[in-house]
């Protein structure tokens, strides 16, 4: 992929395809802005904004065009010159025209990746003797998505989806075990939060980043998480524990959030408000909660010239921010925005579990 730097700007470019066909030259000439918002916990969204004309007979020629029919497939690609990468493949779910007496009308075409299909309606049902990965695979198939699943290992005696949308239910199950739900076109991935992965890109303060606003807070950090349950089979209590040293990775940092909590006598928490029936389930939940809290040690927002390799679920490396704030960060959300006037920029949020 082409990479723009502050000292080496490139000509940004965008491509919007509807049902596999690029926009006409006329429509492309009227593009005001294209935005893609991606988040590990929400369906990714695209917004394509088109400017109208001063033609009284057709001020907004695309408003009734079948090209932008609800349900049509849309791909958005961004990059530089002819080197473009796809950021989203989704479906149109809404149209938003705007009319005002003092400016030209506009039409915003809005849509989401196929996770939006999982948000429609609510269900109540049970899953018996299944792993979370089995449940996700089943629900993905029901939505017409191909499942790309990493085994979650633990078999649950009984799981209830209680008047929830499939999306809310899947994210609840994912958060419980420190997994994430990601959709790329027609493929749904269910995988562990990969803050232990190698970085996909290194961004330097003096060359790549336009701004960086990190915050380090030890307030919520825990030295230990304990999960308590009850085994109906063995008629005895179950305890799962995760503590300092159980971090999936310290992301190249010198001191993890849990270790830092020891400065204040190492706070701990006990969880007993969830049905826990097996030792494996208790251990898995304790480690997931422990690592989830640890990742909140450092959070931050950054902006750089547009980069398609900055995506939620990836790890980036920040250089030049001092020993405490330089290093690997897990990307939780990213907004890619292109406009003919302003160019292409990427704004994203990150988190880290060590300093």
Image (cartoon, helix red, strand yellow):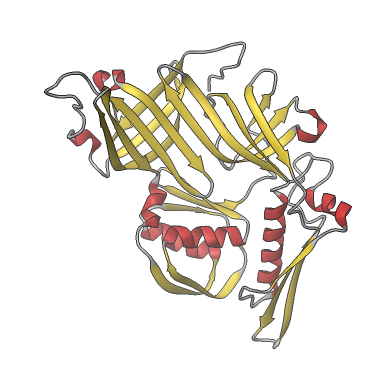
- Residue 122: give x, y in percent of width and height: 38, 65
What residue is rendered at 37% in x and 35% in y?
47
What residue is rendered at 65% in x and 70% in y?
281
- Residue 241: give x, y in percent of width and height: 77, 67
- Residue 105: give x, y in percent of width and height: 25, 27
Residue 239 appears in the rendering: yes
Query: Residue 159 versus residue 31: which sits nearer the camera?
Result: 31
Q: State which quadrant residue 153 falls in.
A: bottom right
- Residue 27: give x, y in percent of width and height: 26, 23
Work out which residue is located at the far front of the displayed protein and give it: 101
Tell me if 86 is positioned left or right of 58 in this view.
right
Query: Residue 309 versus residue 256: which sits nearer the camera?
Result: 256
Tell me if 153 is positioned left or right of 49 in this view.
right
Could you tell me which quadrant the C terminus lies in? top right
Work out which residue is located at the far left of the displayed protein and give it: 57
279 shown above or below 151: below
What residue is rendered at 33% in x and 29% in y?
49
Tell me if 302 is positioned left or right of 286 in this view.
left
Residue 151 appears in the rendering: no
Q: State which quadrant residue 144 falls in.
A: bottom left
169 shown above or below 64: below
Query: Residue 233 versus residue 11: which sits nearer the camera?
Result: 11
Query: Residue 184 versus residue 264: which sits nearer the camera?
Result: 264
């Amino acid at each position: 992929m082409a990479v723009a730097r502050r000292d080496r700007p490139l000509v940004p470019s965008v491509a919007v395809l509807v049902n596999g066909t690029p926009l006409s030259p006329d429509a492309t000439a009227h593009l005001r802005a294209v935005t893609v918002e991606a988040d590990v916990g929400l369906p990714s969204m695209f917004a394509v904004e088109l400017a109208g004309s001063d033609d009284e007979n057709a001020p907004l020629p695309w408003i009734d065009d079948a090209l932008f029919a609800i349900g049509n497939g849309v791909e958005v690609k961004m990059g530089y010159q002819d080197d473009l990468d796809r950021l989203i493949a989704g479906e149109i779910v809404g149209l938003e025209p705007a009319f005002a007496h003092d400016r030209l009308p506009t039409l915003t075409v809005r849509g989401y990746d196929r996770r939006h299909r999982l948000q429609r309606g609510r269900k109540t049902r049970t899953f018996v003797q299944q792993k979370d990965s089995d449940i996700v695979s089943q629900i993905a198939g029901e939505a017409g998505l191909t499942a790309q699943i990493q085994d979650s290992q633990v078999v649950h005696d009984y799981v209830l989806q209680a008047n929830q949308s499939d999306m809310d239910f899947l994210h609840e199950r994912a958060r419980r075990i420190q997994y994430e739900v990601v959709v790329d076109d027609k493929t749904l991935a269910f995988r562990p939060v990969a803050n232990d992965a190698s970085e996909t890109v290194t961004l330097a303060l003096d060359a790549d980043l336009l701004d960086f606003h990190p915050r380090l807070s030890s307030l919520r950090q825990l030295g230990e998480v304990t999960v308590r349950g009850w085994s109906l089979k063995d008629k005895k209590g179950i305890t799962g524990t995760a503590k300092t040293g159980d971090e999936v990775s310290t992301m190249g940092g010198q001191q993890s959030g849990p270790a830092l909590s020891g400065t204040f006598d190492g706070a701990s928490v006990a969880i007993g408000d969830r049905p826990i029936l097996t030792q494996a389930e208790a251990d898995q939940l304790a480690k997931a909660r422990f690592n989830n809290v640890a990742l909140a040690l450092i959070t931050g927002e950054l902006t750089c010239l547009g980069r398609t390799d900055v995506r939620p679920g990836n790890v980036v490396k920040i250089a030049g921010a001092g020993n405490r704030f330089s290093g690997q960060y897990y990307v939780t959300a990213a907004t890619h925005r292109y406009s003919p006037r302003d160019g292409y920029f990427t704004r994203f949020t990150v988190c880290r579990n060590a300093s």
